[in-house]
Image (spheres, rainbow, N blue to C red):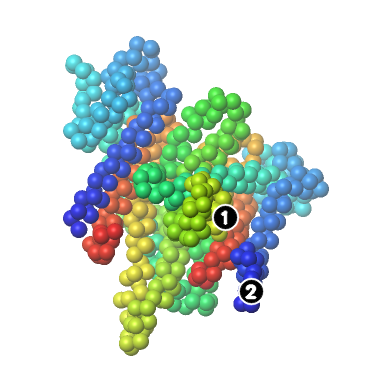
Amino acid sequence: MASGNLSQGALAWSRFKRDRVGKASLTIALVIVLLAAFSPIILGILNLDAYTFYKDTLDPNTAGLPKGIGGISLTHPFGVEPGTGRDILARLLTGMQLSLLIAIVATTITMAIGVVIGLIAGYFRGIVDKFISTGIDLMLAFPVLLLILSLSNPLTQRLVSLGIPEGNPARVTYIILVLSFFGWTVIARVIRGQVISIREKEFVEASISMGAGPFRIMFRQILPNLWAPITIYGSLTLPSYVATEATLAFLGVGVLPPTPTWGAMLADSVSFFRVVPSYLFFPGLTLFAVVLAFNLLGDSIRDALDPKSIR
Amino acid sequence: MLRFITRRLSTMVGLLFGVSIITFLLFSALPSDPAALTCGKNCTPEVIEQNRIRLGYDKPVLEQYGVFVSGIFTGRTYGSGTATFDCDAPCLGYSFNKGEEVTVLIGRALPATAQLAAGAFVLWIVMGLGIGIISALKRGKWQDRLGIGFALVGTSLPAFFTGLLLIFTFVFWIPIFPAPRYVEFDRDPLFWFLNMLLPWITLALLYSAVYARLTRDGILETMNEDYVRTAKAKGLSPGVVVRKHVLRSALTPIVTIAGIDLAGLLGGAIVTEAIFSIPGLGRLTFSAISQSDLPVIAGTVILTSAFIILANTVVDIIYAVLDPRVSIQ
């Protein structure tokens, strides 16, 4: 490659640009984020709303089942919910906002905790490292899903007593907090490994000899060298959180109705999936497509940042 | 070697101690009152107080922990005077919701979960390693792309969606399988097998994707090693090189993950058990959570963590036996 004095980022970008799957998944991911951000406008144009009961789409002869195949029509391209007649497309788009918000915030907190703890363990080594590594071993031994489920009620109440508004704000905060609390261990391990080797480089030695304090070295000099693993793991954590949020909602730890998230919609669709399969398929396939797109994007970012990776 | 094993075992005991005390403190700090759940409609403040003393919830938390731990090894006796009952070792507590010892409840649920985990494990190892090996050997060809595609799809599908999709397709749409209803193996082996197949596939899809990737990457990485080149250069057939030289080193990291994954699964697959109505540990815990049945939840949390810690230790020791360099580190 004729790129003698390109920066690492420019090199990675030039590699990324040649990756067709990467470009496609980046486009899809951007479209998804834009759809979520502008969902109120889009729904305004389509003249749909996530909370309106479109009663005329339901068959009065059955117990509130949609007319035709899942109530699919030109006005309701993805059909309607059985029982209420709420538009599935509108709920998917509205729900995407909250699903993505939870995943993005939780990923950011996870990465921040993981990076700081990994830096500390890798930089100080010795007893500090031993302590942190044992803590990580301990945390990895816990059945996470089980703890998240069993702590949900009491900890949500605790959040309310700390001043977070009851209902969805407290529930969403709980989901974000537990995802981050149980998620940082893997990132901390990766960062720790990287820091242990970076720490031996000459520029760190030079900084120490010039009298720089440990925190200055860690955050001003070592941290900038860690952006590759941070980007890679961040982009792979995000889709896994979108899926986990859905799983938690499926198991009953989610937002309160009528607020939609993808997980809440899927959980709701289970009781109807035999008679109105479209109610399960549209949210399920959307979730799958979004998670797949972000996973592909994460893979492509990894390939671009780490030329040694095997493809 | 002996020193390595002793050190590893003492770490294991330390971790077990840590996990159990954290679980215990966590659950005793929760606002729900286990004594109030013991009497249902007959609850009066006096009854609750009586049961609190009978169950030992009136004691300080650390003392309760001590009694709990000694109960695991020697059993314990609840209550005093004439109104006592024994909980034999290993005693993980007593569920007043269900009116049974936690160990009895777990013992009843464990077989179903073990069958689920074992079958899924076999399936995902065969699928994961198979796809990974084929992908690596056919690198860049269509088989490889198919393999990578499968791995990505598998990791992107949440278990509950795969499970529901399988039920919809193979139970309702093309009715090959009976509606999910758990039957014990000795009652009707064929029906048992038909019923377990879809849950096995659900879990196998989820796990084998990760294994396929790890296997593929591991093999491709090992292929670049000098000793593999030597093996090829001395004229060994490609099959022998892959089987005897590449796989042995490429599969080591997979053994670690396989041990931990299997152990974690033995603690119950909440989602899969819920979808396919399998009366295993996952279902037991899930219903315990909805009833705030703390002794059962704490019991299964500690048991699952113990499985994971044990698997980790066993895998480490096996490594050290297979590869003496490990124990020197």
Q: Report the chain holding disc 2.
A: A
Residue drawn 35% across and 74% down?
B246
Closer to us: B21 or B270 = B21
Judging from the image, what secondary structure is the residue with disc 2 in?
A: loop
> Residue A171: percent from the left, percent from the top?
57, 34
Q: For residue A224, which numbered disc appears in the image? A: 1
> Residue B7: percent from the left, percent from the top?
24, 50
Q: Alpha-carbon distance for marks 2 and 1? A: 22 Å
Q: For residue B65, which numbered disc appears in the image? A: none
Three-letter amino acid code at disc 1?
Pro
Q: Are marks 2 and 1 in contact (CB under 8 Å)?
A: no
Closer to us: A272 or B109 = B109
| Tally of numbered tags | 2
Residue drawn 50% across and 56% down?
A206
Q: Report the chain holding disc 1.
A: A
Q: Is residue A307 left or right of residue B281?
A: right
Three-letter amino acid code at disc 2?
Ser
Residue drawn 54% across and 47% down?
A216
- Residue A130 position (above or below residue B56): below
Residue carrying label 2 = A3
- Residue B94 position (above or below residue A175): above
- Residue A63 position (above or below residue B254): above
> Residue B89: percent from the left, percent from the top?
20, 35
Closer to us: B304 or A127 = A127
Name which quarter of the figure residue B29 lies in: top left
Considering every residue shown, the one lying at the far top of the view is B46
> Looking at the image, can residue B271 be seen?
no
Tell me the crowding category of disc 1: few under 14, some 14 to 19, or many 20 or more residues within 10 angstroms, Cα based: few
Image quarter hosting the N terminus of chain A: bottom right
Nearest to N terminus: mark 2 or mark 1: 2
> Residue B290: percent from the left, percent from the top?
45, 33
> Looking at the image, can residue A84 be seen?
yes
